[in-house]
């Protein structure tokens, strides 16, 4: 802990904000049933179910709210709409990029956006009762300062119920796959988060248990985001092992990655089948999330919101770039069912245009383009495909995005 006093933080004795929606308050009470620093109880709690996402995918706040509602209705346990909302993204050499302004605070290894991209989404989640963990990819940024700048900025939102750390990106400039969280760090981080609201929870996420704190548990939720399984059975077996490893603490799972598409795409209802298979094995599951990489494949836009966009999403498909991660070139492929005016661009995480790969009319069929990142810094980039149909009855513009990782 750096010793910097927390600014404008209510003492732990102050109760939950009285203006928070009743549904959020009830869910928090169900989840948080004992004091910090002790082992979590073996009791049934609310099941938070929804998506992992961020603004960089280009989907509307209404769409994300719809996904959270839809995901939460899939399971044998009553679900509460929820999200892991990503605020910072790893770049290179320990540096990260934030999708919001600094508020006048400089933090080592953090570059801040000039505008706040998250407020429209969090406002929508407030209205819809979607429960949100604000997640960071930390890099080499000092974690206590990162917690402070995030929660000072967003704690006024009733949707916020906690803070998450993707440990895969913790000092990854020095440790491949991130370094292990120490017991003392986990304790300090949890206390810092709960200093802002005693009902907030901290989650730590990774795909291997050995990056988690050796013995400290507190009230931390441990989330597994493993992928590249041979099938449903392998997925359930590995996630079950994780759940038992951290029991009686609550655990969560993130699934739906493109590498697992060959098997989950054969399931009649992938979120329900995967989630309910896990719920049958574990009684300490707190959260189930579908990842943003394949979100529209499983949750296409509702016809009542965007009938033409739903049609187009099926007819214009942007694939994940290959290879990914890449250095320095990668191939981007997409398929079009009709003639359309296409603009294919690459952006950095601050929303700055890096390259225009295509800008013109293309025929129907399968197309490819190559992005050369030789002149770019290592880090995460967003490839966005914009298609304006020029034939047929559908004339709405459709946009699809993929994140790409350039290694240095």
Image (cartoon, grey):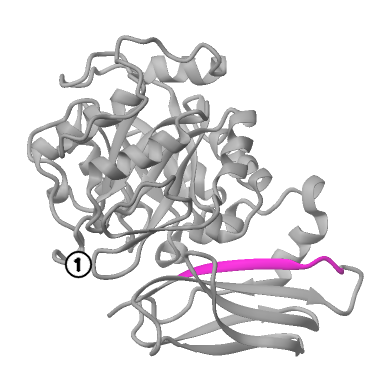
Q: Is residue 261 magenta?
A: no
Please say if 334 is above or below 382: below
Residue at 35% in and 43% down: 253
Image coordinates of residue 370 in percent, x first then y, are 51, 90
In this rendered view, identify the residue nearer to me: 131 or 111.
Answer: 111
Please say if 33 is above or below 342: above
Tell me the crowding category of disc 1: few under 14, some 14 to 19, or many 20 or more residues within 10 angstroms, Cα based. some
Left or right, 167 with reference to 187: right
Residue at 55% in and 32% down: 130
Image coordinates of residue 69 in percent, x first then y, are 60, 36
Query: Can residue 155 be seen?
Result: yes
* Quarter containing the N terminus: top left
Left or right, 299 with reference to 245: right
Query: Can residue 283 be seen?
Result: no
* Quarter containing the C terminus: bottom left
In this rendered view, identify the residue nearer to me: 76 or 159.
Answer: 159
| Residue 11 picture quarter | top left
| Residue 286 picture quarter | top left
Q: Which residue is mark 1?
A: 173
Left or right, 162 with reference to 139: right
Image coordinates of residue 336 in percent, x first then y, are 71, 79
Element under label 1? loop
Please say if 211 is above or below 314: above
Of all residues, the one furthest to the right in this rendering is 393
Q: What secondary structure prevails in the magenta region?
A: strand
Q: Where are the magenta residues, as a range? A: 395-403
| Residue 193 picture quarter | top left
Image coordinates of residue 163 in percent, x first then y, are 35, 37
């Amino acid at each position: 802990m750096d010793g910097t006093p927390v600014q404008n933080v209510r003492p732990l004795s102050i109760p939950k904000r009285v203006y928070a929606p009743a549904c959020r308050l009830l869910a928090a009470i169900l989840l948080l049933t004992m004091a910090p620093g002790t082992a979590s109880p073996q009791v049934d709690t609310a099941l938070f179910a929804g998506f992992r996402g961020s603004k960089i995918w280009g989907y509307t706040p209404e769409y994300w709210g719809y996904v959270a509602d839809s995901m939460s209705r899939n399971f044998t346990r009553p679900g509460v709409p929820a999200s892991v909302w990503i605020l910072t993204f790893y770049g290179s050499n320990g540096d990260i990029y934030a999708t919001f302004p600094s508020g006048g605070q400089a933090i080592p290894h953090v570059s801040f956006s000039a505008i706040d991209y998250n407020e429209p989404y969090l406002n929508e989640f407030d209205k819809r009762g979607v429960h949100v963990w604000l997640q960071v990819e930390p890099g080499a940024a000092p974690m206590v300062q990162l917690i402070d700048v995030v929660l000072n900025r967003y704690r006024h939102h009733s949707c916020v119920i906690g803070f998450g750390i993707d440990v895969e990106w913790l000092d990854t400039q020095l440790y491949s796959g991130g370094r292990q969280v120490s017991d003392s760090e986990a304790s300090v981080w949890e206390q810092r988060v709960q200093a802002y609201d005693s009902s907030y929870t901290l989650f730590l996420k990774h795909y291997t248990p050995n990056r988690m704190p050796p013995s400290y548990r507190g009230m931390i939720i441990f989330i597994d985001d493993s992928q590249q399984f041979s099938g449903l059975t392998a997925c359930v077996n590995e996630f079950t092992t994780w759940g038992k490893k951290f029991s009686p603490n609550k655990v969560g799972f993130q699934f739906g990655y493109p590498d697992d598409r060959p098997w989950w795409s054969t399931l009649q209802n992938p979120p329900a089948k995967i989630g309910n298979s896990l719920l049958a094995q574990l009684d300490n599951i707190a959260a189930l999330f579908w990842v943003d990489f394949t979100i529209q494949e499983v949750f296409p836009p509702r016809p009542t919101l965007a009938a033409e966009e739903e049609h187009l999403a099926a007819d214009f498909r942007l694939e994940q770039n290959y290879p990914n991660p890449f250095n320095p070139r990668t191939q981007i492929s997409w398929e079009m069912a009709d003639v359309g005016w296409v603009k294919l661009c690459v952006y950095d995480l601050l929303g700055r245009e890096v390259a225009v790969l295509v800008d013109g009319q293309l025929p129907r069929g399968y197309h490819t383009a190559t992005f050369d990142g030789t002149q770019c810094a290592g880090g995460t980039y967003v490839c966005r495909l914009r298609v304006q149909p020029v034939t047929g009855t559908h004339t709405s513009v459709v946009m699809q995005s993929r994140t790409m990782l350039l290694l240095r």
